């Protein structure tokens, strides 16, 4: 997954990647060359007391250093450029992919998961690529090169590498194998602590009302000490790592000197090579350390890559037609005929045998208990999901033959979870119509019963809206999101349980003014409250995905048992009569 | 609905990830660095003894460790002299050898020999080498051992301190008045206790020991360098500030880019979150192209800033590496020259090279460490702000004890304002006899919970008095007062745990029968039994199997379990489906029987049957009386009643 993702998204930058690899090689060779020069300097200069030779080699070493720097800077430039451009392209790819998703794919992943995939996961992969371009490739090159040079310097002494490297690899590996799962546990415990705290802050009233502060403090304390113990294990294991690696490196130096001395004594190695060998073995150990550390990042990045690929490879189940037809007149006439919707592979359909007509100028209400398919029915109209069989016609044409943009242009949507965009109140309202005048916005606010509280804010229409609208109460958000739909002046209103956070009075006022201003529009409305739907022209009663009653309040009271049950649960019999 | 922002800082464990500094947030500045640092160090008070032990261990470890290269250098010397000696004929004295060399015109080599302990004809003195190397091993081992010990101890200090800080914060939260929670954003509060404390832990763990370590390393390495060769030490001393200067210069510039990168990341994440969450709206309102367009702009900005940031920080290493290579070459050349002329031994040059490498590292680390400490202190400051927030007035020391109240509640001339300039409740009087029901009605946002806040002493009244069974509630301890109440709110707050724990809610050792009978009374027993693990099924945030209505029933069961004298109920049942709604109504009615109840009422029957109806609007109490009285008055209540229920009555 990681590889194929890299292959696809790095293609445009393959020349730069090739240059990076080439420069890494140059850099590694130059770095390996320096100890070699140093050995020469000792063997031929110092030992023989040849000062001019010392100066000469010094000059070459300087040149090599400058070369290394030049290569490194170009490397830093190219690898930063490639890795960041890769991240940018990948983010763009994921974002565009999600924008084509239908409600089904969106629900399948869930918005929070999609957000993480497009942000953190891309970041992970990008980071590994960046590290890879700068270090991961350099580590093996240096390691192999240094080993080669070490063997060339003295083959016998190189046997030491065979001892030291495995010890180091095992040491790091053992420690990491202990730390990595502990890290995961620690993360879980951190989340758990956050959860407990979030619950406590959210439920502060209830906790105090039930006098459970002590109980909650104990709960927090045990979670906190649990976290402390795990964190202690992690940091204490970490504490072994650095000193033991230092010790190993130092012991290696000692071993090189000891065994090297024997070789020097027997005359099989010039003394300068001892110094060079010390440098090589350090380079080898460092690259092993790097490689092991880096390789830890790969599984995480691979998991991220997989999550990204899932998004990229998901095709939307709703495909816009390539040959759109346009209805003669857009007036908002909706006709369901024998509509069924089922999730692929599901045993029972969510909706079946749904046939009805919603006419312009009419209020069509949909009631039913949780899970009866009300929201699914509404989602079919804007083609957030597609019918499994049957058809939905909008203004006489099957919606699958019309362009998505065309369908959407007719619809004013107020979703169940009222969502506002970050910005100002006016910007949110102008989602409906970018060209709307302030006056039109105020009109819409009046109709939605939102003008009062907006007027109370000194900034008025320019008042800030936090992301998601969190600085407004649930009821205020609902009214603003209704106003946003009104600004659009749509032919069709889709109101999915949009009055739930409003009290009866506001609910009633809003419906009355909406009926007046949207007199010619088709209004579809899902509601839990009987009082909200009493005046509907047509009430559709859903039960387990089927229509069990259709008609107005009085008709249904007479002939629909489910409807009667719903009404009676909210009003006493004498009130409902 | 609160949306989660991925851009907010995730708590990072100690030493998480090698790229911590690169991708973390830019260190925030503290307002009073000195003061907060002092206070933070004071929090380490209980660890003072272990702390000084840690410092001692670090000092010994660093000093001992710094002798290593010098000692290894001596070993190299023995090897070198042995090497030279082997090349001369045996039997020759050193003086003869020197004279011989001078005769051949090799005066430099002769000088070198002069200063050395070469014995012509004799090879390497392995006995001496052995001794030196054993000493080196011992020093290195002790140094590493001490380093590990201090790391081990420091982890304990840090984690215990963090645990203490968390407990302090948690206890503080328990003593803060509710008004504090109402004015602070939850996310911010949460972040002070979790992220900030975590950040403090990081800077304690990394900052404390490493700053000391780096400083000591610099001092002792410098001392070693001067000891070996003051002239070469001077060369290093010129070059090292240069490399510091260069890297700080570049780091400062790249820091700006990192801040920009962080900024754009936040903006981009925000945009992504918004567009994904509002996906359907973006489509229907025809904003897809604009969403993609905005995304591309942000994405490009992020690319530019992160490219610059990474590139800038990427050139620090090569530049300092060049400088360090220059020193290396300079020392190799100058040292080599001096060895050749007998001014210095080969082992010393080798040791010197190692020291000069060791010298640069802590210097460049210190700048980074300062950032960590700074950000830790800024976090500590935020935590201290929380710890210093004004607390509730303490309970009276001679509080009247109350075991179980009768449930008589009186408001006498009570006035209250959340904000001093905005009058809310003025001279309000009400007398509720045990077992009576008070219905509070009014439109959305009318402030119906204000009375609840006052009666449970979540807020303090400005004047007048509230009495329970004739005792002023301020004369009672808050706990005693609140124990008399049971609360069922619309916001069905439950915690992550089993169903049983949620119903028992902290009752110590509740019997199974008690929990079940509470659940039965709340009409939730059947549902709980139908769950896979019955009463022990876990309740989590994302538990889709428990609907809003069922959650409400569990909170009712909780109130049954508590068996209070007085009830506070919120009837609003939005997004509860109709069948569950019936169960909720029944359970609430059962719960109310025989208890004084304050009901935020939505159901006509509750309101009509209430002994007193309080009508609220815009936060103020505007009418008070029973149904008949208020209808006769033809005021606000009359209108409200007509708009809510008249339609259904025709």
Image (cartoon, coloured by chain):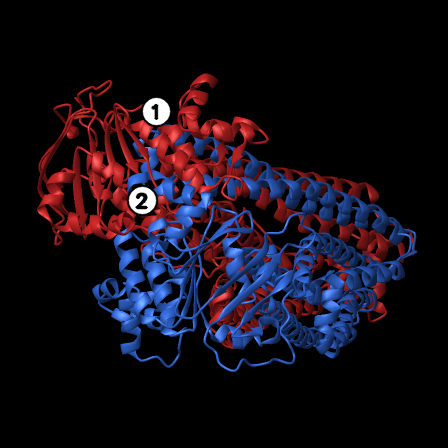
Query: Where is mark 2, residue-wise?
Result: A577
Is label 2 in a helix, a strand or a loop?
A: loop
Q: Is residue B607 left or right of residue B145?
A: left
Alpha carbon separation for disc pair 2 and 1: 39 Å
Q: Are marks 2 and 1 in contact (CB under 8 Å)?
A: no
Label 2 packing within 10 angstroms: few (<14), some (14-19), many (20+): few
Residue drawn 48% across and 40% down?
Answer: A193
The chain ID associated with circle 2 is A
Near-viewer residue (A260 or A471): A471
Can you say whether B8 is above or below B380 in the image? below
Q: Which chain is blue?
A: A
Near-viewer residue (B557 or B42): B557
Q: Position of residue A266 (x, y in %)?
A: 92, 52
Total marks placed: 2
Q: Is residue A120 left or right of residue B170?
A: right
Instruction: From the image, state whether disc 2 or disc 1 is nearer to you.
Output: 2
Q: Is residue B461 left or right of residue A15?
A: left
Near-viewer residue (B440 or B161): B440
Query: Where is mark 1, residue-wise?
Result: B562
Near-viewer residue (A32 or B46): B46
């Amino acid at each position: 997954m990681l590889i194929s993702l890299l292959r696809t998204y790095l293609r445009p930058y393959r020349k730069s990647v090739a240059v990076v690899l080439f420069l890494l090689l140059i850099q590694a060779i130059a770095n390996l060359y320096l100890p070699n020069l140093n050995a020469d300097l000792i063997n031929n200069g110092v030992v023989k007391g040849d000062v001019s030779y010392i100066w000469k080699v010094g000059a070459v070493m300087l040149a090599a250093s400058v070369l290394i720097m030049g290569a490194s800077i170009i490397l830093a430039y190219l690898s930063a450029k490639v890795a960041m451009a890769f991240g940018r392209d990948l983010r763009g790819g994921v974002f565009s992919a999600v924008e084509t998703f239908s409600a089904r794919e969106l629900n399948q992943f869930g918005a929070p998961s999609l957000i993480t995939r497009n942000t953190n996961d891309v970041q992970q992969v990008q980071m590994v690529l960046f590290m890879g371009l700068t270090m991961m490739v350099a580590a093996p090159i240096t390691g192999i090169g240094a080993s080669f040079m070490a063997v060339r310097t003295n083959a016998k002494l190189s046997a030491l590498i065979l001892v030291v490297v495995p010890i180091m690899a095992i040491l790091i590996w053992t420690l990491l194998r202990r730390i990595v799962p502990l890290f995961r546990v620690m993360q879980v415990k951190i989340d758990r602590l956050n959860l407990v705290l979030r619950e406590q802050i959210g439920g502060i009233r209830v906790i105090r009302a039930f006098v459970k502060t002590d109980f909650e403090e104990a709960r927090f304390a045990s979670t906190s000490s649990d976290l402390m113990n795990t964190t202690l294990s992690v940091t204490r294991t970490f504490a072994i790592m650095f000193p033991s690696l230092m010790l190993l490196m130092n012991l290696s130096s000692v071993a090189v000197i000891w065994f090297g001395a024997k070789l020097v004594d027997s005359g099989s190695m010039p003394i300068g090579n001892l110094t060079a060998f010390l440098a090589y073995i350090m380079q080898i150990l460092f690259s092993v350390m790097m490689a092991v550390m880096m390789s830890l990042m790969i599984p995480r990045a691979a998991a991220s890559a997989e999550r990204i690929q899932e998004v990229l490879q998901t095709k939307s189940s709703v495909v816009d037609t390539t040959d759109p037809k346009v209805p003669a007149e857009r007036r908002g006439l909706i006709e369901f005929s024998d509509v069924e919707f089922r999730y692929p592979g599901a045993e029972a359909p969510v909706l079946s045998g749904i046939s009805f007509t919603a006419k312009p100028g009419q209020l069509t209400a949909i009631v039913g208990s949780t899970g009866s398919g009300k929201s699914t029915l509404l989602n079919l109209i804007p083609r957030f999901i597609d019918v499994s069989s049957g058809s939905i016609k909008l203004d006489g044409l099957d919606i699958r033959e019309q362009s998505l943009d065309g369908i959407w242009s007719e619809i004013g949507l107020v979703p169940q979870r009222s969502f506002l965009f970050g910005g100002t109140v006016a910007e949110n309202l102008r989602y409906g119509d970018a060209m709307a005048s302030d006056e039109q916005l105020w009109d819409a606010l009046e109709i939605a019963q939102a003008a009062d509280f907006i007027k109370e804010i000194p900034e008025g229409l320019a008042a800030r809206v936090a992301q998601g609208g969190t600085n407004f109460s649930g009821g205020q958000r609902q009214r603003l999101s209704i106003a946003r739909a009104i600004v659009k002046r749509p032919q069709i209103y889709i109101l999915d349980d949009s009055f739930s956070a409003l009290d009866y009075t506001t609910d009633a006022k809003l419906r009355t003014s909406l009926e007046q201003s949207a007199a010619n529009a088709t209004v579809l409305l899902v509601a839990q409250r009987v009082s909200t739907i009493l005046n509907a022209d047509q009430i559709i009663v859903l039960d387990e995905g089927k229509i069990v009653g259709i008609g107005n309040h009085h008709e249904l009271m007479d002939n629909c048992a489910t409807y009667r049950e719903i009404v009676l649960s909210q009003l006493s019999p004498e009130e409902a009569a | 609905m609160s949306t989660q922002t991925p851009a907010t800082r995730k708590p990072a464990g100690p030493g998480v990830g090698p790229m911590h500094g690169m991708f973390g947030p830019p260190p925030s500045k503290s307002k009073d660095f000195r003061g907060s640092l002092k206070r933070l160090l004071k929090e380490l008070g209980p660890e003072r003894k272990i702390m000084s032990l840690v410092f001692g261990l670090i000092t010994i470890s660093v000093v001992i460790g710094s002798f290593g290269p010098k000692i290894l250098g001596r070993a190299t010397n023995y090897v070198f002299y042995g090497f030279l000696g082997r090349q001369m004929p045996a039997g020759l004295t050193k003086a003869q050898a020197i004279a011989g060399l001078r005769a051949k015109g090799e005066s430099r080599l002769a000088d070198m020999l002069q200063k050395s302990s070469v014995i012509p004809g004799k090879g390497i003195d392995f006995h001496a080498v052995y001794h030196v190397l054993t000493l080196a091993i011992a020093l290195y081992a002790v140094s590493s051992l001490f380093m590990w010990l201090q790391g081990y101890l420091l982890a304990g200090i840090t984690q215990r301190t963090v645990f203490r800080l968390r407990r302090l914060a948690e206890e503080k939260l328990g003593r803060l008045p509710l008004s504090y929670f109402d004015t602070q954003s939850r996310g911010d509060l949460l972040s002070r206790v979790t992220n900030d404390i975590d950040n403090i832990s990081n800077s304690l763990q990394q900052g404390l020991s490493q700053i000391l370590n780096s400083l000591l390393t610099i001092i002792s390495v410098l001392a070693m360098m001067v000891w070996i060769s003051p002239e070469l030490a001077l060369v290093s001393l010129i070059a090292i500030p240069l490399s510091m200067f260069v890297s700080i210069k570049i780091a400062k510039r790249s820091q700006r880019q990192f801040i920009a990168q962080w900024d754009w990341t936040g903006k981009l994440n925000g945009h992504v979150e918004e567009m994904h969450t509002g996906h359907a709206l973006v489509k229907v309102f025809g904003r897809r192209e604009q969403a993609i367009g905005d995304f591309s702009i942000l994405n490009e900005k992020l690319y530019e800033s992160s490219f610059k940031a990474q590139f800038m920080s990427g050139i620090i290493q090569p530049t300092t590496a060049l400088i360090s290579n220059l020193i290396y070459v300079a020392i190799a050349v100058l040292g080599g020259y001096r060895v050749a002329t007998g001014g210095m031994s080969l082992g010393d040059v080798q040791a010197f090279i190692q020291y000069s490498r060791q010298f640069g590292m802590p210097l460049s680390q210190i700048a980074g460490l300062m950032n960590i400490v700074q950000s830790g202190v800024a976090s500590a400051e935020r935590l201290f702000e929380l710890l210093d927030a004004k607390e509730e007035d303490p309970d009276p020391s001679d509080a009247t004890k109350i075991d179980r109240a009768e449930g008589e509640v009186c408001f006498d001339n009570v006035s209250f304002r959340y904000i001093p300039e905005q009058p809310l409740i003025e001279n309000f009087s009400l007398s509720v006899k045990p077992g009576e029901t008070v219905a509070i009605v009014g439109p959305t946002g009318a402030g119906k919970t204000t009375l609840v806040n006052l009666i449970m002493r979540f807020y303090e009244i400005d004047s007048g008095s509230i009495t329970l069974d004739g005792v002023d509630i301020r004369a009672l301890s808050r706990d005693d007062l609140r124990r008399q109440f049971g609360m069922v709110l619309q916001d069905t707050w439950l915690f992550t745990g089993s169903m049983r724990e949620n119903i028992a809610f902290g009752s110590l050792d509740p019997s199974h029968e008690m929990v079940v009978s509470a659940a039965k009374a709340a009409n939730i027993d059947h549902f709980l039994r139908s769950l896979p693990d019955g009463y022990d099924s876990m309740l989590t945030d994302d538990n889709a199997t428990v609907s809003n209505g069922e959650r409400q029933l569990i909170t009712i069961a909780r109130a049954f379990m508590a068996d209070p004298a007085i009830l506070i109920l919120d009837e609003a049942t939005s997004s509860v489906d109709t069948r569950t709604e019936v169960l909720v109504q029944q359970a609430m009615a059962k719960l109310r029987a025989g208890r004084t109840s304050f009901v935020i009422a939505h159901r006509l029957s509750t309101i009509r049957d209430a002994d007193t109806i309080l009508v609220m609007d815009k936060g103020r109490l505007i009418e008070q009386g029973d149904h008949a009285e208020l209808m006769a008055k033809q005021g606000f209540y009359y209108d409200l009643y007509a708009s809510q229920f008249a339609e259904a009555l025709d």
